[in-house]
Image: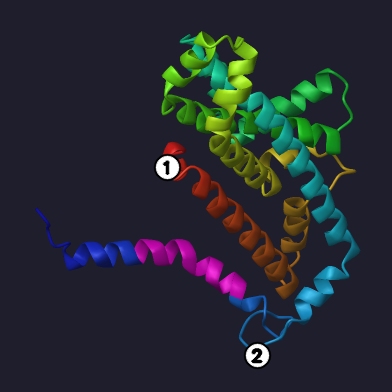
Amino acid sequence: MNRRIPAWMWACAAAAYLFLYAPLAVVVVFSFNDSKLNAQWVGFTTAWYVKLVHNEEMMVAARNSLVIALVASLASTVLGTMAGFAMHRYRTRVLPVLVLAPIAIPEILMGVALLMFFVMINLTLGLVSITLAHIAFCIGYVAIVVRARLAGMDESLVEAARDCGASAPAAFRYVTLPLIMPGVIAGALMAFTLSIDDFVITFFTAGASASTLPLQIYSMVKIAVTPEVNAISTLLLALTLALITLATKFVPGLLRLNR
């Protein structure tokens, strides 16, 4: 039976979405504002995007973020796929806790723990430590998506391949992996998105020599929120939304899985 939604519920929903997305809209709009003060709208311009391209520090930070995100997403996709397959195949209580703990642990605690670990093993903080930290917390997200994909897979297909003489590795390569590939790709896109815009864990594991896009934006925001900051934030927002949208195309229930 269809029930009409009360007007007050529509009003509450509209207010909630306005609270969430209005600040993002302001950032996007003011990235085209022809004013350095960023206090009121003066006129339309794309000069801040041109200036952004010629900002060497910002370009280096963006390059570092892209390299870290690519390496972290590739490594966490391989390890997360293996972890998701193991959680699906072997019903143990310890394995899910070990794999999913980095997701449940607060980011600030995760950052402090990784910082102490890197100091303990005498690893110089920099791009390598950031990449390792991002791999550590991205594995769980990939494992969740892959495990969900495996849960919806027809196991009789694998059994049929084994009955036809295929070995376990061959059955995984030619049957299981193609069937779960949408989940693997979605997990990789999710890991890339989480890595490229992470700040808290990166802040603790970066050291003084390395700079990423979120860290560079933070250092600029401490002085003033200029239209140049709005411009790079808009580009980062567009990239993140594009990757999230692409990921949900591969696994339609991805957003529900991560809640």
Disc 1 marks a residue whose amino acid type is Gly
Q: Name the secondary structure under disc 2.
A: loop
Tag of residue 217:
none
Image x and y of residue 149, in percent: 48, 31
Residue ID for mark 1: 253
Observer-side mark, 2 or 1, equals 1
Residue farthest toward the front in the current orientation of the protein: 164
Which is nearer the N-term, disc 2 or disc 1? 2
209 or 240, nearer to the observer: 240
Q: Residue at x 50, y 48 (%)?
A: 248
Can residue 126 be seen from the camera position used here? no
Q: Is residue 135 left or right of residue 82?
A: right
Q: Name the secondary structure under disc 1.
A: loop
Q: Residue at x 42, y 24 (%)?
A: 154
Residue ID for mark 2: 42
197 or 37, nearer to the observer: 197
Q: Residue at x 55, y 20 (%)?
A: 85
Name above or below for residue 236 compared with residue 67: below
Question: Range of the magenta residues?
Answer: 15-28
Q: Is residue 7 left or right of residue 69?
A: left
